[in-house]
Amino acid sequence: MKAETKMMQAAYFTTVGDADQIQVGPLPVPGIGPDEVLVRIHEAAVDRVDAYVRSGAFKTPLQPQQIIGRDAWGMVAAVGAEVTAFHVGDRVWTNSMGYGGRQGVTAQYAAIPEARLVAMPDGDPSSWLALVHPGATAAIIVTQLLKLQSGQTLLVEGGAGHVGRMLIQCAKICGLQVIATANPRDFAAVTALGAEVIDYAPGWETKLTGPVDAIIDTSGRVPLQLNLDQLAVGGQIILIAATQEPKVSFDLPRFYMNVQRLRGFVISRASLASLTQANHWLLQHAAAFTPLTVERLPLSDAAKAHAMVMNPQVKSRLLITLP
């Protein structure tokens, strides 16, 4: 007699497009390979990159029924024969599923490679899940890409955002001097993280006392040449957002004569080794981070959550609770 297929509830899409492409319904509980772990998902985060994957803006291999979501936490339900780091009942989290051909995690169960799972630290798992996506982005930038020395100066443009707040905290842990631009209503919160804060209104550059060693543009709203004008000789700019105008110009002779550097970064292009290093660094410093605000939504509101995450007025980290 054929064994009955076990089913689970999941949020998924079959065609890229708007948020209304997301369906919520039954899918088979995934099987696991020898190096995989079956996780009973408790909460899945909603990141902007999830919306980019679902819309087709971020080009990546997808499953025919692609479950949404890259970040989640839950409890180990079963382990493959070659898994050694985890056991049934362990609390775990991941932040690298749902793209690159891997199935997403906004479902009651997910099959996750052992190498992409991390043991949950002590404390509130929801708060940790809210932190890991912007936290890993910031950790990779600060500890792997910038290569700044203690005492050098980092300018974070958009210091009040989720990634901006984590950039400030990671940079302070590494001994950097941090200046951040923000709306005046966010000055107190940004200052509490250890940054010198200046109003992001036009003319912000006049408030700088000198050139900075690095700039992270989290907003995509600052003209490239204006940023280059604030950069020290040998300095670098990392873009994690793009302007609406796809083509920009800048003073190329001045750029190369000042041996400056410019690079873009998206965490979904980071290697597993880079991401693993960042995740371990986050765990090492877990107690130092200020929690981000959280808003929970039910699985039935998965499409609503994808619309909300693209709304700049939504300031909380969005978590979908699995039934």
Image (tube, rainbow, N blue to C red):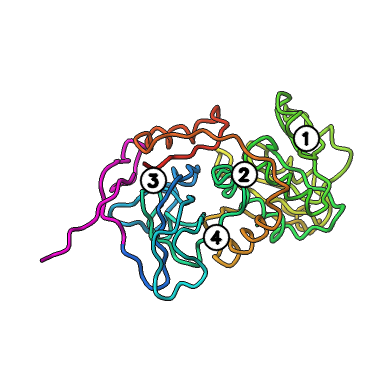
Quick check: 157 left or right of 48?
A: right
As measured in the structure, the alpha-carbon distance from the residue carrying label 3 to the one carrying label 2 is 28 Å
Q: Look at 36% across and 53% down and name the residue there.
A: 109
Can you identify the residue that label 3 sits on? 54
Quick check: 182 left or right of 115?
A: right
Which amino acid does the dot numbered 3 rest on?
Arg
Can you identify the residue that label 4 sits on? 118
Q: Look at 13% across and 65% down and name the residue there.
A: 2
Q: Nearer the viewer, mark 2 or mark 4?
A: 4
Circles 3 and 2: CB distance less than 8 Å? no
Circles 2 and 1: CB distance less than 8 Å? no
Extreme-bottom residue of the structure: 82
Q: The C terminus lies in which quarter of the figure?
A: top left
Q: Nearer the viewer, mark 3 or mark 4?
A: 4
Can you identify the residue that label 2 sits on? 248
Which amino acid does the dot numbered 1 rest on?
Ala
Which tag, 3 or 4, sits closer to the chain's start?
3
Examine the rendered structure and indicate whether residue 312 appears above or below residue 282: above
Which tag, 2 or 1, sits closer to the chain's start?
1
Circles 3 and 4: CB distance less than 8 Å? no
Q: Position of residue 160 (x, y in %)?
A: 68, 35
Badge 2 marks a residue whose secondary structure is loop
Q: Nearer the viewer, mark 2 or mark 1?
A: 1
In the image, which residues are magenta?
1-30
Tag count:
4
Q: Look at 56% across and 39% down and name the residue there.
A: 245
Badge 3 marks a residue whose secondary structure is helix
Looking at the image, which is closer to me, 217 or 318? Answer: 318
Looking at the image, which is closer to me, 317 or 264? Answer: 317
